[in-house]
Each structure stands twice: as C-alpha cells, then as structure tokens.
Image (cartoon, rainbow, N blue to C red):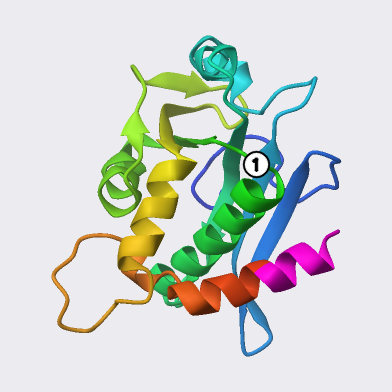
Amino acid sequence: MYAWRGYAGTHRVEEHPHRVTLFATERGETVGTVTLGFDSAEGLLADADFKDVIDGYRMQGGRVCEITKLAIAPGANSRQTLASLCHVMFIYSHTKHRCTDVFIEVNPRHRRYYETMLGFQCLGEQRINKRVNAPSFLLWTSMDHVAEQIAKLGGTASPTSTVRSLYPHFLPPADAASLTDRLLNKTK
C-alpha cells in the first residue's frame, strides 16, 4: 500500500526486538497490518523527525510507543479492521508493556481522521518524514484516554449510531478482558 501511494523506502515487515507486527485476517486472507514500536536505547522511528517533541514525554516519565506501517487492504471492512488492530495494539502496549503515550506519524490527508475517530492530538507543525520522503504530522494520545474511550464506548457500535468515533467498534469490556487474558498468557 505504501509503495502504491508513491512513498519512498522499504516497506517490508522485518524482525526487530522492539517492534511487533500485527495482522488482521478475514477468511484466511490478510486484510490489515500494523507495527507497534516500543521505546529502547535506539529510540522510536519517529525520533528521526520528531525527537524533540517525543523527548518531552520521556522527560515527564512517559513510556512511549509508536504505530507504524499501518495498511488496510482495499475491499476490507476498514473500520472494523482498524478497530480490531487498534484494540489489540492497546492491550499489548498498555497492559503488557505499560506504555503511557502512543505516537503516530501521518500524512496530512489522514490527520483529521485520527483526531476525530481515535482522539489523537496534533503536536506541532508538519515536517518531512525522511523514511518515506513525504509530509507528516506527529499525532499523540495518552493510553489513559484510550482506556476511557474503550470503557465508555467499546462494543456499542450500531448501524444507526451517529457517534463519530472508532471506539464503539472496539470489543465490549467482557470480550476485551478475555482477549487480554489470552494475549498476556500467550506472550509471557
């Protein structure tokens, strides 16, 4: 998907000790992927363009992580696929790794979507993402905000809902607790 949009760089999923890549599947076919990066001595990928901003969260004691390489296949239920990937990312990063802050670099045309649908906030001016040679904004949200939205809205999606948020498509609390238990027991 990234190459198709004309972004530079390599877009392969590679093994890395501080990153995990999640795949969403429907009927055995991959319909979405995303990589979750955890802070380490080498930092986050977003540090290449926004280290000054992210360091402010580190200095306040934040445990930072980032979302990268997000792609949804054409024809997939993009809202449900993204909600599923985001919910698993939240569980994995917040519950297993105790992350407090999550960042994502987005192309300007996607900025409003993440602000509206997931409650991300833009941190400053547009910069050039050197990895893909394209304009980007750095967005941030706290894991506390994500947890609050899941508790309030998770599992409440309906065809008649007028809520402009992805959180109703997250799992309801009981299902989320079961998934959390499975993920934590499987990854210990």
Crowdedness of circle 1 by 10 Å Cα count: few (<14), some, many (20+)? some
Quadrant, the C terminus: bottom right
Provide the residue designation for mark 1. Answer: 98
177 sits left or right of 77 in the view: right
Q: Which residues are magenta?
A: 181-188
Give me the residue at 62% from left, 18% from top: 48
Establish if 170 lies above or below 98. below
Say if the magenta span includes residue 186.
Answer: yes
Quadrant housing the N terminus: bottom right
Q: Is residue 30 left or right of residue 109?
A: right
- Amino acid carrying label 1: it is Arg
The answer, for residue 24, to whether it is visible in the render is: no
Q: Can you give x and y, in whole percent of width and height, for residue 33 in the image?
A: 62, 61
Q: Can you give x and y, in whole percent of width and height, for residue 101 in the image?
A: 52, 34
Residue 184 coordinates in the image, percent (x, y): 75, 63
Label 1: state its secondary structure: loop
Residue visible at 40% across and 61% down in the picture: 150
Instruction: Residue at 70%, 44% (x, y): give it.
Output: 97
Nearest the camera: 183 or 71? Answer: 183
Instruction: Quadrant for residue 155, please give it.
Output: bottom left
Dominant secondary structure of the residues highlighted in magenta in the image? helix
Residue 154 part of the magenta segment: no
From this view, report whether residue 25 is shown above or below residue 54.
below
**In the displayed image of the protein, which residue is found farthest to the bottom?**
27
